[in-house]
Amino acid sequence: MPINSALRSFGIDSPPGWLADPKWALIAIMIMVIWTYTGYTMVLYMAGLQGISKELYEASDIDGASKLHGFFQITVPMLKPTSFLIAVTLIISTFQVFAAIAVMTKGGPVNSTMVLAYHIYIEAFQHYRMGYAAAVSWVLFIVIFIITMIQWQGQKRWQSHF
């Protein structure tokens, strides 16, 4: 594994077993999922950056503001709606992580990567408990809905007032 080779080159003699170790399996899945969503996030931030008017930066230059001041007073506030969209979609996505676990660990080792979405799948399609799986799916929906509503209420602080 390339990561373990890199860790060995830094002097770590026994790197983790990643997917085979219950302590590291979920962390390995999390690293992989974060890496997967990095491109999505960057594309959205690039679109948000392209939507910021150049006149705002020109006006701050005329006023004598530094580049750092322009970043914190123009760029960051103007990217708040984009950041809000990314936060909502990524939090919803984290509750629905299924494919990575189904392919890489199947909930193991020792159920250390058993998340709710994979649990629903196991109950429905391996144990044939469709009613229970449907009920758990509704619970997952309600949890995601509540978290999204909390974020939506908090959005007022995220929005810029330009």
Image (cartoon, rainbow, N blue to C red):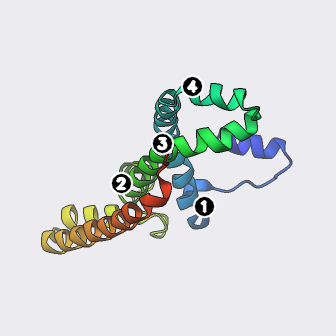
Q: Residue at x 48, y 42 (%)?
A: 37
**Mark 2 or mark 3, whichever is nearer to me:** 3
Residue under the image location 82 percent in, 52 percent down: 12
Q: Residues within 10 Å of mark 1 (few under 14, many from 20)?
A: some
Give the mark nearer the N terminus: 1 vs 3: 1
Residue for point 38% across, 65% down = 153
Look at mark 1 in the image and give the residue it sits on.
24
Q: Are marks 2 and 1 in contact (CB under 8 Å)?
A: no
Whichever of labels 2 and 3 marks the residue nearer the N terminus, that label is 3
Q: Which residue is mark 3?
A: 37
Q: Which type of secondary structure does the marked residue at label 2 adopt?
A: loop
The amino acid pointed to by label 1 is: Trp
Q: Which residue corresponds to mark 4?
A: 55
Find out whether the residues at labels 4 and 1 contact each other: C-beta distance under 8 Å: no
> Looking at the image, is mark 2 or mark 1 nearer the viewer?
2
Badge 2: how crowded within 10 Å, few (<14), some, or many (20+)? Answer: many
Q: CA distance from mark 3 to mark 4?
A: 32 Å
Which is more foreground, mark 3 or mark 4?
4
* Residue on which disc 2 sits: 98
* Percent of width and height locating residue 53: 52, 28
Looking at numbered disc 3 in the image, what kind of residue is underneath it?
A: Tyr
Earlier-in-chain disc, 3 versus 4: 3
Percent x, y of residue 78 = 53, 41
Label 2 and label 1: CA atoms lie apart by 18 Å
Is 156 located above or below residue 71 in the figure? below
Taking the image as shown, residue 62 lies to the left or right of residue 131, namely: right
